[in-house]
Amino acid sequence: MAVISDEKGLPFFIMTTAPQIAAVTGATGFVGKHLVRELVAQGIQVRALTRRPQEDNDNVTWVNGDLDNIAALESLISGADIVYHLAGLVKARTKQDFFRVNSESVTTLATLAEKSGKKPHFILLSSLAARERHLSSYAESKRQGEENLQQSAGEMPWTILRPPGIYGPEDTETLKIFKAVASRFAPIPGDPFNRASWVYAPDLVQAMIAVADNVKCQGKILDVDDGKDSGYSLRDLYETAAQELRVRPLRVTVPKIILKTIAYGNVLFSTLFRYTPMVTPEKVNELYHPDWICHGTHVMKLTNWNPETNLEKGFKATLKWYKDNNLI
């Protein structure tokens, strides 16, 4: 409540509403950066977990710690209205690492949030890969994380989002496609006609915010993409990138057996030289899966959110960011 004066100097009272508080894990990652910026732009107070010092920001409170630090997690979610759990691994040296971060951390954070007095709306950013849990340790760990949330939530409202491929400014994975096309030699890892859905990162965060304010989304697992029902083939991606770069690359489809051989070699070298491999035999299973199109209940069916960016428009904006930052 605030006290102000009218034109005659007489006091009167008005009710003021405190801004929402959103707790965010994975705030320094690709999607997390977009989410934090949009939350701040909408006047929401952000409390974000970080393992490294960050620049001061009047609208963001940084909580030092990681997913294993209970005290930091308690500080993160204290008084929060919404919890966005984005932190996760897309590559790991061991199966145990995938499950520790993508599954066990969900149980820990959800249990703490459920026991907090406010019982915030817990939004888990999962992955469409969770639909095909048999393909890889990554997919299985994401599915297990979803199940852990449902088991740990109690009376706390929750929503699980399953995005497909995510791209946009600041994404280093899509950069590999653009660099390959720019070199005019573009090996395509996977069947070029297999289809997948995609979503532009700024659109995704708008969907996440729309879900947070909609009770219809509570207790649901929702797909979220750019609205193209048939998705895109790998050939579509490379052709769109080539169009934006104005080049005509030589496209070569890499047979699965060759990519699998490379993947086994990569795992061996990662053990010898102690790095975290992205291309593994399990990742090859994901790349060659024929259907990564969103088929489940969609965010658009339950909210007023609609994606604004198709692949061509999104690739244009993404390429501009790469060029502005001298990455291409």
Image (cartoon, rainbow, N blue to C red):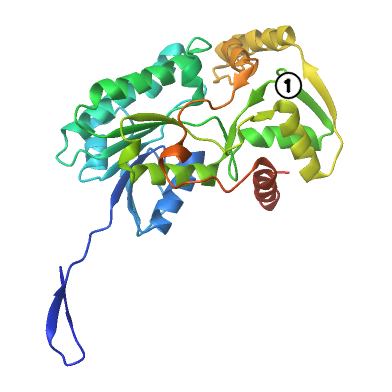
**Residue closest to the far bottom:** 8
Q: Is residue 93 visible?
A: no
Q: Residue at the location (64% across, 30% down)?
A: 231
Picture layout, residue 272 above or below residue 23: above
Q: Badge 1: how crowded within 10 Å, few (<14), some, or many (20+)?
A: few
How many tags in the picture? 1
Q: Quadrant of residue 114?
A: top left
Residue under pointer 1? 193
Picture layout, residue 57 above or below residue 79: below
- Which one is nearer the viewer's eye here, 3 or 96? 3
Picture layout, residue 120 above or below residue 45: above
- Image side of residue 101 versus residue 80, left or right: right
Q: Residue at the location (51% across, 46% down)?
A: 306
Q: Report x, y in % for residue 305.
A: 47, 46
Q: Is residue 281 visible?
A: yes
Q: Report x, y in % for residue 220.
A: 35, 30
- In the rendered image, the quadrant that contains the N terminus is bottom left
